[in-house]
Image (spheres, rainbow, N blue to C red):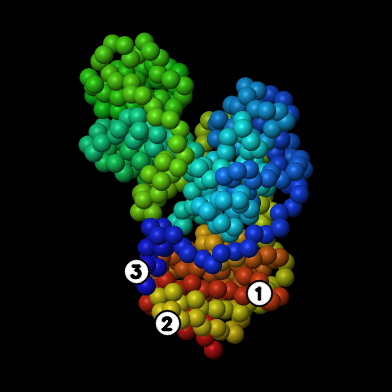
Amino acid sequence: MYTRFLLMFAGLLPVVAAAQACPVVPDTMLAARIHAAGGPEALRVERVPVPVAAADDVVVRVHYASVNPVDWKLQEAGRLPFPATPGGDFAGEVVAVAPGVTAFACGDLVAGIVDPRERSGSYAEYVAAPVAALAPAPVTFTLQEAAAYPTVAVAAWRYVVGAADVRPGDRVLVHGGAGGVGSMVVQLAKARGAHVTATASARNHDYLRGLGAEAVIDYRSVRFEEVVRDMDVVVDTVGGDTLMRSPGVLRDGGRLVTLVGQVPAALCTSGRIVCPAVPAWDVQAGLAGMVPLIAAGQLRLHVDGLYPLSQIVQAQQHNRAGTTRGKVVVAVAADNVASASGDDVAGVRVPLQAYLDGHATGQRRHFERAFAEDAVLVGVKDGRYRHWPARDYILASSSGRVPADEAQRTRRIRQITVTGDVATAVIELDYPDMKALDHMTLLRRGGAWHIVVKAYHAWTPGLADGAVAR
């Protein structure tokens, strides 16, 4: 049983929860809309009808969406059915299912992609999405991260695995390595055993080395063809002159792929290099291929900016600037907007009762001790597990730093205080590192506020005794 729990925690087995009744979905919602071809400044947040699940669809309450360049490119090119709601990537909770759909149920946390050329996009409080474009939200990701990864994960899988067939020992050059897709390409190529070199501005060199790049080239001061040669694969996310100069760094028989349009035929006709065919866009195959790597901790995402839906213009402008490190995320659900807008979480101090949920021991203990001492509220993070009816996670600690030993962890728990008008809540301990008390959420049950401590390790009951027992 304990082994099964660890596998569930690692994302290798699904977290099984009792089926939930579908909630009442409102008739209208807030959505970012655009009425004619235009850039980010043409977006307006409006109230519109909530989409209905068609055959093989589910309706998802969107917690977070993320911005991809294709979003604003479709807007500017006028390739949307105006008036339109743009956006593709999202993560949230299933709230309605079409008859006959069994792959997902109400209460499931999912991530996915919709095509705003065919249906209402993800810059909205609710989205109707086909089952084939969804996957369970990775349990090792927050919902912010889950919203950020679908398009970049599918694109990386499509080009690194499907087209370039990157293999162990390959020497791979990634152009634009710090962007959303580029950073995923770097990590996926590394996970497949390749030696990765990336191009990026100087400020992103340490970031890319942390993702697994063995060498990074500052494209602003160095021409990449002067410092690399005999590469097995070039993956281009930039296009233009960068793409045109890339064949010169490939060995004979090397593979060249680009995510920006197509490789010009003139580059592929010499017979010296290979321009492999790119497989069809397959959301489920791409996400399924990435899940084991995510569960193993080999893939991670950087959220470069978090904006509320009311600031969708600024979110798209951030992405359009072309200097994004990772992804730009939009907090859509009302529960998450305060953290994205930077509003102070302040107000009445809330007395809390503590619970211990002993997963390791199978025991559940109830403590009546209230937490009294001040703590530093350092941020907000979304929940991960569908079996807790929680929406917001609050990162909290007494000092903001990792405790050095178990005794400090004990004191840390005793010092936690929650302030503000918080709607939901859980204290959670990081596993397997157990280095810090990282996540906290408030659960409201029967009109009372509670803390739930999730025990993931044998010493946790002793820790909890020292921390909260009378």
- Residue type, mark 3 in image: Thr
Q: Residue at x 65, y 23 (%)?
A: 78
Q: Nearer the viewer, residue 98 or 416?
A: 98
- Quadrant of the rendered structure where residue 124 is? top right
Q: Is residue 112 above or below residue 254?
A: below
Q: Residues within 10 Å of mark 2 (few under 14, many from 20)?
A: few
Q: Nearer the viewer, mark 3 or mark 2?
A: 3
Q: Secondary structure at mark 3?
A: helix
Residue 126 can be seen in this image:
yes
Q: Secondary structure at mark 1?
A: strand
Q: Is residue 28 left or right of residue 383?
A: right
Mark 3 or mark 2, which has the lower sequence index?
Answer: 3
- Residue type, mark 2 in image: Gly
Residue topped by disc 2: 462
Estimate the x, y position of residue 168 in percent, counting from the top left. Answer: 23, 38
Q: Residues within 10 Å of mark 3 (few under 14, many from 20)?
A: few
